[in-house]
Amino acid sequence: MSTADILERVFAEWNHGSGMECEMFIRSKKRSLCVNDIVCVNGEYFQCASFGWNSVTPEYVNELEEAVSSNSRRDIGAWFALSDVMWERNKKQNLMVA
């Protein structure tokens, strides 16, 4: 399978309502994979985007993990902290472009 095929399959297997949910996902009772989540395929990291995937570096993944770990909403849940971190990063990036 190509990396693109693997990522598509992971997305389907880890999303409620896809009709292709894997057994481990169903048993885990976790939320679906969503935008900003990161998946590693054959040692390469990919971040889920609104449409498709973006390749990211291990350094990016480490920086993101550190930012999420130190986010004030981490005690509520990692997803909330990740959402905050990505919101701030996107806001800064948009200000730099403008």
Image (spheres, helix red, strand yellow):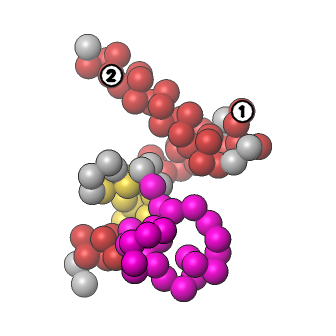
Identify the residue at horizontal 71%, vertical 33% (top origin): 72
Q: Choose the circle earlier in sequence order: 2 or 1.
A: 1
Q: CA distance from mark 2 to mark 1?
A: 23 Å
Main SS, magenta region, reads: loop
**Element carrying mark 2:** helix
Picture coordinates of residue 11, whole percent (x, y): 38, 68
Drawn side of residue 6 relative to residue 88, left or right: left
Q: Quadrant of residue 39?
A: bottom left
Drawn side of residue 80 relative to residue 14, left or right: right
> Disc number at residue 14?
none
Whether tag 2 and tag 1 are in contact, CB under 8 A, the answer is no
Identify the residue at horizontal 64%, vertical 75% (top origin): 28
The residue pinned by badge 2 equals: 94
Identity, as a three-letter code, of the amino acid under mark 1: Ser
Q: Using a 10 Å C-alpha cutoff, classify the residue at mark 2 as few (fewer than 14 neighbours), some (14 to 19) or many (20 or more).
A: few
For the residue pair 39 and 31, the one nearer the viewer reads as 31
Tell me, yes or no, whether the highlighted magenta stretch contains residue 26.
Answer: yes
Picture coordinates of residue 41, whole percent (x, y): 38, 72
Picture coordinates of residue 80, whole percent (x, y): 62, 42
Tell me, yes or no, whether the highlighted magenta stretch contains residue 20.
Answer: yes
For the residue pair 2 and 23, the one nearer the viewer reads as 23
**Element carrying mark 1:** helix
Identity, as a three-letter code, of the amino acid under mark 2: Asn
- The answer to whether residue 97 is visible is yes
Q: Using a 10 Å C-alpha cutoff, classify the residue at mark 1 as few (fewer than 14 neighbours), some (14 to 19) or many (20 or more).
A: few
Depicted 27 relative to depicted 48: above or below: below
Highlighted range, magenta: 11-34
The residue pinned by badge 1 equals: 72
Q: Residue furthest right?
A: 75
Split into 4 quadrants, where in the image is the N terminus? Answer: bottom left
